[in-house]
């Protein structure tokens, strides 16, 4: 697997570290001085911090009791578990359109929250709840033994949780909170479409500087400030180690009481998606399909599917090679986390600076998609690979298989469900990619997410209805792909 590690390292060098180095070189000089002396940019930075921290706290407040609910065995448990992750894999324009359909200026509820903090925090919780749940649930399942021991020693259920359960789950809470912070702090699509200029995050500000002022030095400086903050968060994330706990099983529950309660919960949680579907106009969908004023939906759909397929051809071998190399190599494990620290807008900006001769080349766009998708595939595959017994591989080697043949004929079939989950995450990430696509955009490359943004940039009811129709189609496409491949089995490692 040494060649696999070399392949990933080479790709990271060309697709991540060199472009980031160009950002660093440009941002440290004149641009950094301008950014540090401008109170407006500090205001954007403090708001991004506030958005990241409060989003993480609100998500954990909801995710912790939800994780304890899923410790029980009840009908439709796996379906609800799969549904909980669905918002995380939805493209950001779809989520934004869902909230606009419900709580926007022309929303179904008649309450206009557009451009408010409340709407941004609601969207952040909706988007990240499933991610936090996937991290907390495995630890919550293993807490039953320690909690039972505390109860036997005379502690009440509340005291047992407070004195035993909570300290044991604290590292997982920290990990989940830090990941939500990272995603919210570097959020782009949701703040851009729901926050307006007043609540622009650093990521949105960087895009504005590039798109409207061509201010590369200042944009690079802000991106550098963002990368430093995210690096600190990732360092803290790596310091958090879970306590070793004996494996636990599912607890019994009243058969339908839990299913009914969680059904009502998910009905309310998915209200933005219901709003999107209720506002769906088939006439607008037909109009968008062959639009003459905007990119036709037929072209955008074809581009999305074509780019997703091509990028997956890069992301799949990279993800498998990285997971195989990182399972016993802490340095490779650390290297593989770097793409998660860098925002899509930063990736796009880095490519424009590092490879000016390739501007307008499809290769840059596909490399950006693969870079942002392969870590998701690998993080889903890693826990399964690490849980395999080394004796299985040794047995294959004793029977004459080469290391490569043993890996593909013995290990990969055993971790196929985890690989399917990783593929689902990677596919959803590529299909809904928005930030890098916007920076590297060419008119003939318009994807579904860009087609939505294109229509939202034009005032009027007709473009808004077409945007809603495309968002509904994209949500359906992402949801079906994710459910067919994952079905709630995935873990994040």
Image: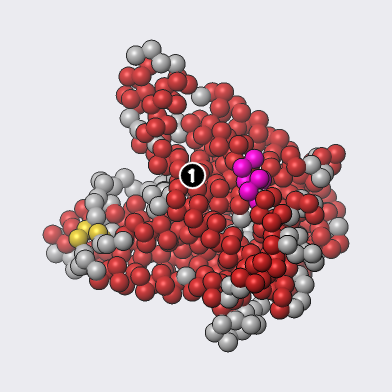
Quadrant hosting residue 459: bottom right
Q: Coloured how?
A: secondary structure
Q: Mark 1, residues whose alpha carbon is within 10 Å: few (<14), some, or many (≥20)?
A: many
User: Is 410 located above or below residue 18 in the figure?
Assistant: above
| Residue 86 visible in the current orientation | yes
> Residue 11: within the magenta?
no
On the rendered structure, is 416 left or right of 369? Answer: left
| Residue at position x 46%, y 63% in the image | 129
Q: Nearer the viewer, residue 204 or 449?
A: 449
Q: Is residue 127 left or right of residue 314?
A: left
The residue at 27%/68% (across/down) is 258
Task: Answer with the quarter of the image where residue 183 lies.
Answer: bottom right
Q: Residue furthest bottom?
A: 110
Q: Nearer the viewer, residue 273 or 328?
A: 273
Residue 307 on the magenta segment? yes
Query: Could you tell me which quadrant the C terminus lies in?
Result: top left
Left or right for 394, reference 451: left
| Left or right relative to 377: residue 368 | right
Question: x, y (%) of residue 261?
Answer: 31, 72
Q: Which residue is mark 1?
A: 422
Is residue 54 among what the camera can see? no
Q: Quadrant of residue 458?
A: bottom right
In percent of width and height, residue 124 lies at: 54, 67
Q: Residue at x 34, y 52 (%)?
A: 138
Mark 1, secondary structure of its residue: helix
Q: Indicate the position of residue 146 as horizontal and vertical percent values.
A: 23, 54
Report the span colored magenta: 304-310
- Name the spot of residue 235 as percent of width and height, x first: 54, 48
- Per the picture, the main secondary structure of the magenta-coloured stretch is helix
Please report the residue visible at 55 percent of the width from the left and 52 percent of the height from the top: 428
């Amino acid at each position: 697997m040494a060649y696999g590690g070399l392949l990933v390292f080479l790709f990271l060098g060309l697709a991540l570290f060199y472009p980031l180095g160009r950002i660093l070189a440009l941002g440290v000089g004149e641009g950094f001085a301008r950014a540090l002396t401008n109170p407006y940019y500090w205001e954007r930075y403090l708001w991004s911090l506030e958005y990241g921290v409060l989003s993480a706290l609100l998500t954990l407040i909801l995710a912790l009791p939800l994780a304890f609910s899923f410790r029980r065995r009840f009908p439709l448990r796996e379906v609800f578990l799969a549904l909980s992750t669905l918002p995380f894999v939805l493209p950001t324009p779809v989520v934004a359109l869902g909230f606009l359909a419900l709580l926007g200026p022309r929303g179904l509820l008649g309450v206009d929250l557009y451009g408010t903090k409340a709407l941004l925090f609601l969207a952040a919780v909706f988007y990240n709840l499933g991610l936090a749940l996937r991290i907390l649930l495995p630890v919550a399942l293993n807490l039953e033994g320690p909690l039972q021991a505390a109860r036997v020693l005379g502690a009440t259920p509340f005291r047992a949780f407070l004195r035993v359960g909570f300290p044991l789950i604290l590292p997982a809470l920290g990990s989940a909170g830090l990941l939500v912070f990272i995603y919210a702090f570097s959020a782009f699509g949701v703040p851009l479409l729901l926050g307006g200029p007043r609540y622009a995050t650093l990521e949105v500000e960087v895009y504005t500087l590039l798109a409207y002022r061509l201010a590369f030095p200042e944009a690079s400086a802000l991106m550098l400030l963002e990368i430093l903050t995210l690096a600190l968060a990732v360092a803290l994330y790596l310091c958090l180690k879970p306590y070793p706990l004996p494996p636990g099983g599912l607890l019994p529950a009243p058969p339908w009481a839990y299913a009914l309660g969680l059904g009502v919960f998910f009905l309310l949680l998915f209200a933005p998606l219901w709003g999107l579907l209720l506002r769906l106009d088939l006439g607008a969908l037909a109009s968008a399909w062959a639009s003459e004023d905007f990119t036709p939906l037929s072209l955008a759909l074809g581009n999305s599917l074509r780019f997703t397929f091509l990028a997956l051809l890069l992301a799949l071998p990279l993800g498998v090679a990285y997971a195989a190399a990182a399972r016993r190599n802490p340095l490779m494990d650390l290297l593989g986390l770097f793409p998660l620290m860098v925002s899509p807008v930063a990736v796009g900006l880095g490519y424009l600076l590092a490879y000016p001769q390739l501007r307008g080349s499809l290769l840059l766009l596909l490399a950006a998609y693969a870079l942002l998708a392969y870590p998701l595939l690998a993080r889903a595959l890693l826990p399964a690979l690490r849980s395999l017994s080394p004796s299985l591989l040794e047995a294959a080697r004793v029977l004459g298989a080469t290391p490569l043949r043993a890996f593909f004929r013995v290990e990969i079939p055993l971790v196929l469900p985890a690989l399917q989950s990783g593929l689902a995450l990677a596919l959803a990430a590529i299909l809904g990619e928005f930030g890098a696509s916007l920076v590297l955009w060419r008119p003939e490359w318009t994807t579904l997410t860009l087609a939505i943004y294109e229509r939202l940039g034009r005032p009027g009811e007709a473009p808004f209805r077409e945007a809603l129709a495309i968002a509904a189609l994209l949500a359906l496409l992402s949801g079906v792909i994710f459910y067919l491949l994952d079905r709630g089995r995935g873990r994040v490692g």
